[in-house]
Amino acid sequence: MTRTTGRLSLAAVLLLPLATACGGAAGADDGNTVTVTVGYQSKTINTVTAGTLLRSLGYFEEELAARGKKDGKTYEVKWQDYATGAPITAQMTTGKIDIGSMGDFPLLINAARGKQLKQPTRLVSVTGYNLRGGLNTVVTAPGSKLRSLADLRGKKVSTSIGSAADGTLIRALEKAGIDPEKGVRKLNQQPSVGASALAGGSIDALSQFVAWPGQLAYEGKAKALYDGADLNLPTFHGVTVREEFAEEHAGVLDDFLAAQRRATDYLRERPVAAAESVAEETGLPAEAVYLYNGAHGIATFDPALRPELIAALKKDVPVLTKAGLVRDVDVDAFVDPKPLRRAAQAPAYPKVTAGDAKSELWLEGRDSTRTYDTPKKLLSAVAAAKKSGVRAAYVPDALTGTLWFADRAVWVADGSDLRAFVTPSHAKTYVGQHAGARVVGYADALELAS
């Protein structure tokens, strides 16, 4: 087998269904009943406004019910849950899923396979994004001696090939001077399998997307080795639709996007309630959900097809092409802003940058969080709140702005100031640039702040 053939075979494997698919054709219309099948990833919480949260709120069904009162038809929604974007694409290319949500790299594979198999798809909205790339993280076991990405040379690394996390891993390794194919022993595994492998010690590191890194860190099962925000390249998840469905049921697609906007409003206005809802639906810790989906979370939720995100998508194409996962993708032809313009007649959300992140404290029994201007003030509040109970405390990385759990962060004392970092390499960089600065433990940081 040639290397090229092997890569194309791998690309085909990525399309194999990883969960039971619905039977029959999606987008079915028997004249009076229209069935819409939506593929989503319940535990990929950067997509909740087009998946888990949207489903629990029932907004899409409400929009369709209103449409049915006008046109006399009955609309039914079938929700299909998957672990990654690959099986959603597999079902879309056979006409069994109409609308799906997935990360930026899977979206490009979705575009390529749709065109190849004559079931073209279109990117119509974004769910959540991070302009620096902080949604993807490489983690190691808590007791690992690895301190930087350079230490991964020759090590076993688990990821989901073709995912956004895999794209981050490839770019990060190249930036560190490590061949992504030969420099590490990369294993193609589902996120849950990789998490188990990390816990069992059969791999050295895990590169995954939301919410796996945060969940494992919260549970004390992993620590961050590499912050995807170091790449300083936007990453996002979005909504893709079969072109045929979009043309035949344009109004239904409009309803989905209007419902997505309502779910986005809900999440932005009631972030704690949204996190609790997603946690209840998925079994994920609400504290880990909030790390990404909170008021100052790693992800910013906004359906807009921002130019920065589309430009980043174009930069992703060569990475996937080099990996043999796509031959080429016409991003401009794939992106279709028209449905969102029709459906979302509302003011634009403000763009969020890394510098906007704030330290947050979530106390037991509270339905809102408190924000603090500095990590030191947060720690002071944590120390004072011990009796009432701290549910979670979050701090932004001093270099990238990526939010992380305060008790899992790497702390540096710099004079009377305290700074937090997601990874040891970030702390090392800061200490190297600031004379007198030193790494301290979390307990020491608390004491210094109180």
Image: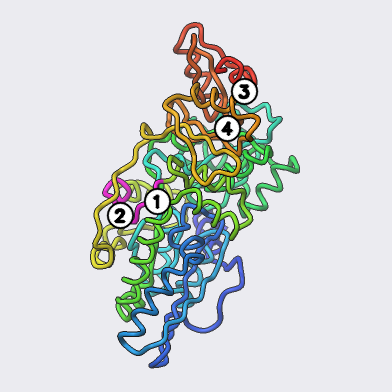
Crowd band around label 1 with a 10 angstrom C-alpha radius: few (<14), some (14–19), many (20+): few
Establish if 67 lies above or below 217.
Answer: below
From the viewer's perspective, is the residue at label 2 or at label 3 nearer? 3
Any mark on residue 339, and which? none
Q: Find the distance from the CA under tag 4 to the CA under tag 1.
A: 33 Å
Q: Residue 304 has which mark?
A: 2
Q: Nearer the viewer, mark 1 or mark 3?
A: 1
For disc 4, the marked residue is 225
**Image side of residue 400 versus residue 248, left or right:** right
As measured in the structure, the alpha-carbon distance from the residue carrying label 1 to the one carrying label 2 is: 18 Å
How far apart are the alpha carbons under marks 4 and 3? 17 Å
Does residue 128 appear anywhere in the picture?
Answer: yes
Residue 302 lies in magenta, yes or no? Answer: yes
Name the residue type under label 2. Ala
Pointer 2: residues within 10 angstroms few (<14), some, or many (20+)?
many
Task: Looking at the image, tell me whether mark 1 or mark 3 is earlier in sequence order.
Answer: 1
- 195 lies left or right of 31: right
| Amino acid type, mark 1 | Glu
Q: Left or right: 291 with respect to 441?
A: left
Q: Which mark is residue 269?
A: 1
Residue at 35% over, 90% down: 72
Q: Nearer the viewer, mark 4 or mark 1?
A: 1
Stretch in magenta: 300-310
- The kind of residue tagged 3 is Tyr
The circle on residue 442 is: 3
Question: Residue 390 at x, y = what percent?
Answer: 61, 35
Image position of 253 (left or right of 17): left
Determine crowd level at label 3: few under 14, some 14-19, many 20+ residues with C-alpha closer than 10 A: some
